[in-house]
Amino acid sequence: TLRHPELGTGPVPTDIYWQPEYYQRELDAIFKRAWLCVGRVEQAPKPGDFFQKKIPTFDLSVIVARAKDGKLRAFHNVCQHRGNHVELRDHGHCVGFTCPFHGWTYGLDGKLVGVPDQKAFFNLDKGKLGLHQLPLEIWEGFVFVNLSAEPPMTLAEFLGEHGRDLEGYPFHRGTAIFEYEGVIDCNWKCLVDSFCETYHVPILHRHSVKDTLAGPDNPHGRLIDIRLKGPHRTQSVWGNMAYQPNPVQGLAFRHAPGPSVTSGAVDDSTVLPKGLNQTRAPNWSIDVTVFFPNWIVVMGSGMYFTHQMWPLAANKVVWQMRGFMRPAQNAAQRFGQENSMVELRDAVLEDCNTLERIQHSLDQGLLSEFVCHDHELAPRHQYHVVKQWVKDYEKGLKKQRKANKKSAGKNK
């Protein structure tokens, strides 16, 4: 923490973790302006392929489709005639999208190509009635969209050093995927914070991952390092290389197609990018990399998984977890994968149950400040980033209103 004096060492106010009014400000200042991950390129590899991503925060449905020109595009799933959804499937292959209400048809590039009984409309301009397209950019195979028609910065600018330092990780090898999802009664930032500090590991996770991410040589679960890069951050987590698994767990670890992130083991054949285990510590297990505002990628040398948080209210969030593993080549490897899935699930459920109790205390007004441990730098950083984004956005709005008022006066 002392490496970042601008963040201070005092308690962190809890106001932004429970106030409904501040939550609404976050939606405008952050979630409508930041780049949001919605999937991977492998979900639509060929022309005609598409997938749909629901964004619960705004009750939106976004279609990502690959057109004949090979380019991926993102659209709101809204027919420009009467507003019905043009696609009801989560994913698939097609030559275009047809609204099931009146049959308006759109190409994979979003253009309106067919209108039944078009002559009965008055001066219908199909060129202006295509599907509403969203800005889309790709980083390392991950598809990002921006809900602003004119994003304040490109994806590369938004990710900055954080994105550059993680380029080259073999994300593409993790094609065996598992998913968990649930609604948790807590603030979205509480959920992000819970995955970004390991001070709680020896206590909360004493029956799950304590012995692999902490141990006799690191009884308090201290991190190896924390790196702040713009609004993003990375935590390097210590691994107990002397950990002795129980018989069933050992069998699973031995036969998994790549080291599980719960095993504390490292695959020496994986070349790590600069930003992963940046200190090159020999006792490293995983990095918890946070892509502001709501996407976390937990990266090991043999597999990775993601958390994504979609706020629904000041005290409610949709949590989505996706694991990406190398495909199993036999039943033994498949068994190893299943063990990884279950171990991760159980550890995460321990976090989620705790967070609902924390939120209850916040909503009751029983805690006005969080006292932060030195290794809880990530939650401290998140607080300052959120406050700064809201402040900068509202300052810009105020400046724009003042300019508009001045311009209106001159026109009179």
Image (spheres, rainbow, N blue to C red):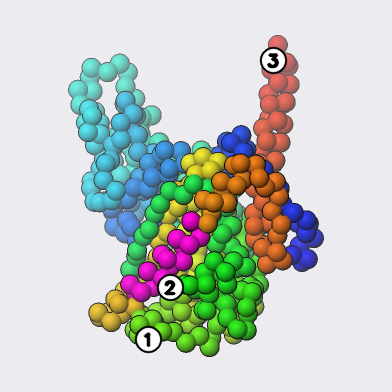
Where does label 1 land, which residue?
247
Determine contact: label 3, label 1, CB under 8 Å: no
Q: Residue at x 42, y 55 (%)?
A: 320
| Dominant SS in magenta | helix
Q: Position of residue 189 (x, y in %)?
A: 58, 51
Where does label 2 land, which residue?
303
From the viewer's perspective, is the residue at label 3 or at label 1 nearer? 1
Mark before the other along the chain sequence, 2 or 1: 1
Determine contact: label 2, label 1, CB under 8 Å: no
Q: Quadrant of the C terminus?
A: top right
Would residue 115 be seen by someone viewing this image from the given angle?
yes
Q: Is residue 407 magenta?
A: no
Would residue 67 be seen by someone viewing this image from the given angle?
no
As shown in the figure, which amino acid type bears the numbered disc 2?
Met
Q: Position of residue 188 (x, y in %)?
A: 54, 49
- The image shows residue 261, relative to residue 315, as above or below, that is below
Mark before the other along the chain sequence, 3 or 2: 2
- Secondary element type, mark 3: helix
- Secondary element type, mark 2: loop
Tell me where residue 411 sits by quadrant: top right
**Horizontal arrangement in the rendering, residue 399 relative to residue 325 (left or right):** right
Q: Nearer the viewer, residue 394 or 376?
A: 376
Q: Quadrant of the N terminus?
A: bottom right
As shown in the figure, which amino acid type bears the numbered disc 3?
Asn
Q: Nearer the viewer, residue 319 or 110?
A: 319
Query: Which residue range is magenta in the image?
Result: 337-353
Q: Which mark is residue 411?
A: 3
Q: Position of residue 31 (x, y in %)?
A: 54, 43
